[in-house]
Structures are given as structure tokens and as C-alpha cells.
Image (cartoon, helix red, strand yellow):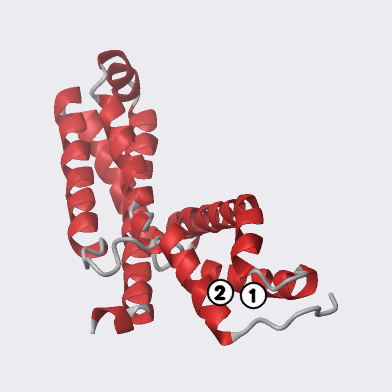
Amino acid sequence: MEKKYEIIEKQLVFLNGFLLRKYPSISDETRIELTDHLILDFEATTENGNLSQYLSNELGFIRKFVFNGVRKVKKTYRMETWSQFFSFFTDFKLLPITIFISLLFYFLNENLNNKIACLSIFILSSILFLVSIRKGMINKKALKHLGEVKFLGTEIWLPFFLVQLLAEKHIGEFITSNSYLFTVYSTFIIMYGLAALLILRKHKKIILEKYKHLLN
């Protein structure tokens, strides 16, 4: 697009402040990408250099852009967690962990009663869940508003939800009635929970390093 107008420093400050006030949880990547787009479009289309009016007209686009940025963050966490989960079955270094967990649950279901088998998966998954919250979540007040932080622990809830299903009488009885089904179900819960924990800790380090200037 050909420029009709060149944005001034004061307007850049206003634009950045507007986005941070309107969407305090916006990630740096989304904000920078959105800012670049708005500047280029504003410079190419404005007739009078009125940035406030331009932003008012573009509120729908801005809202959609930020929403898509949030979805991208959540999708990234989800995709990386699934990738880590599958690595427990494809990486020869990690495969022994998966085999051990599978054999453990098969043994428990074959040799102990259903309640004990269910209790074992509940205890192990609860430990993973608590460790994820304790070691993976970010509780820094200066960072809590960021979308990257808000959605950091979303994937740890899937195993927690699946464990709750075992408490439903008919579902629990159906799953524990077959050792192979119980083994697959329980192994998935633990391995996915472990994958979520690893990705959680990975991104915690990335976020703390990325926003360390906000913590000083």
C-alpha cells in the first residue's frame, strides 16, 4: 500500500497504550504484529491523520485479531503437549517409562480390587496435578494478566477430568472390568499429565526469561 500519511511518535505511544488498556492480557507477539498491521493500514488509508477515529472504526478487526492470538497461544500449548505425549511411545529413551506405567496399572487391576485400582490412578494423577500447579504455574503478579500465563496450565485439566469419570459408578465399573481397557485409560491419564507438566515447565522458563524486565 502507498503511504498517504506518516504516523508520528506521539501517535505510536497512544496506539501502544490503547492496545494495552483495551487488552491487558495481549501477548507481546500479538501486540507487535497487530501494531505493525494497524500502522501500515492507517498510513495508507487515513484522510486526516485522526488515529482515534481510525481505531474506533477498526475495533471489530482488532477484537478478532486479539482473539485469534489467544487461540494461537492455547493451540500451541495443546499441540506441544500432544507432541510430548506421543514421544513417550516413539522415543526409545522415554519408552521404558510408558512400559513401566502400563505394566503397573495392568498388575494393579489384575491383582487388586477395582476400588484400589481406581484409588491408585487417583493418587498418581493428583500428585502430577499438584506438582504441575506447584512447579509449573506462574504466580508473579506482574505477569498474571498475560494470555501466555493465563492459559499456561490449561492442558493439566484433561487428566484431572478423566480421573473424575472413574468416580461415576457405571463408567468406573465398565473401565475397571477389563484390565486392558483400564491399562490404556490409566496410562493415557498419567502420560498425558506428565507431558502437560513438562510443557508447562518449559514454557514457564521461556515466559520468565522473556518478561524478566517486568519483574525487576
Report the amino acid beneath label 2. Ile
Residue 138 versus residue 161 in the image, above or below: below
> Tag on residue 16?
none
The image position of residue 55, as x and y in percent, is 61, 61
The image position of residue 140, as x and y in percent, is 22, 68
In the picture, the quarter occupied by the N terminus is bottom right
Left or right of residue 20: residue 61: right
Report the amino acid beneath label 1. Asp
Name of the residue lying farthest toward the front? 48
Asked whether the residues under the numbered discs 1 and 2 touch, taking CB atoms below 8 Å apart as contact, a structural biologist would say yes
The image position of residue 215, as x and y in percent, is 25, 79
Residue 127 versus residue 106 in the image, above or below: below
Name of the residue lying farthest toward the right? 2
Q: Depth check: 56 or 184 in front?
A: 56
> Tag on residue 36?
1
Q: Which residue is mark 2?
A: 32
Left or right of residue 75: residue 105: left
Please give the count of numbered marks on the rendered protein: 2
Residue in the picture at 37% in, 49% down: 154
